[in-house]
Image (cartoon, rainbow, N blue to C red):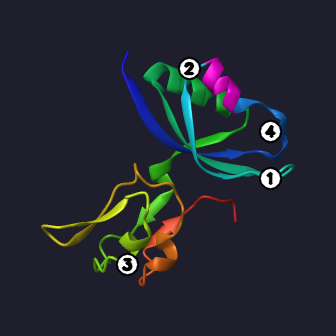
């Protein structure tokens, strides 16, 4: 069976703190998880950026399980926006992007953004002099 990796932003309700959700993803759905970012506080809503790896069926069933437990799951690329039309390709953001999601194309000298590599560290936000990055990770 073909394995695939997908990145999601998960938002947990306050009452989910005592539920072993990640355990069930691993044990019941045979999904490998990699926590890329976490903001979880007891008694409050929480957010996780997870990379999930499994078969298409297992990923679909695992996401359905999370949603049945009031966890919203959105693909990571829906949470990050970048206004590339206004970008001047100055490269400031590439200097702070340790995940390698932002790189300069050496042939065209233009910024390239790969949301699949992004871990939502938000370091690009203050680095961009034109404020072109928007990240919707928290409920503000």
Query: On the image, numbered disc 3 is attached to which residue?
Result: 92
* Quadrant the N terminus occupies: top left
Query: On the image, numbered disc 1 is attached to which residue?
Result: 41
Q: On the rendered structure, is 14 left or right of 11?
A: right
Q: Seen from this angle, which residue lies furthest right?
A: 43
Tell me the tag on residue 30.
2
Tell me the tag on residue 16.
4
Mark 1, Cα crowd under 10 Å, few <14 / some 14-19 / many 20+, is: few
Q: CA distance from mark 1 to mark 4?
A: 11 Å
Name the residue nearer the viewer: 22 or 61: 22
Mark 4, Cα crowd under 10 Å, few <14 / some 14-19 / many 20+, is: some
Q: CA distance from mark 4 to mark 3?
A: 39 Å
Q: Seen from this angle, which residue lies furthest top?
A: 1
Q: Earlier in the sequence, mark 4 or mark 2?
A: 4
Secondary structure at badge 1 equals loop
Q: CA distance from mark 1 to mark 2?
A: 27 Å
Do the residues under discs 3 and 1 have CB atoms within 8 angstroms? no
Span highlighted in magenta in the image? 22-28
Question: Where is residue 109 shown, x and y percent of the image?
Answer: 19, 73
* Quadrant the C terminus occupies: bottom right
């Amino acid at each position: 069976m073909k394995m695939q990796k997908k990145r999601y932003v998960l938002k947990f309700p306050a009452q989910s703190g005592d539920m072993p959700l990640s355990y069930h993803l691993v044990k019941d759905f045979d999904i490998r998880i990699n926590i890329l970012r976490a903001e979880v506080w007891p008694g409050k809503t929480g957010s996780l950026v997870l990379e999930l790896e499994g078969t298409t069926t297992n990923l679909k069933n695992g996401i359905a399980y999370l949603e049945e437990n009031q966890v919203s799951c959105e693909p990571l690329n829906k949470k990050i926006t970048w206004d590339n039309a206004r970008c001047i390709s100055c490269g400031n953001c590439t200097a702070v992007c340790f995940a390698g999601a932002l790189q300069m194309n050496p042939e065209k000298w233009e910024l390239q953004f790969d949301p699949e590599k992004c871990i939502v560290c938000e370091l690009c936000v203050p680095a961009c002099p034109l404020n072109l990055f928007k990240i919707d990770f928290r409920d503000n």
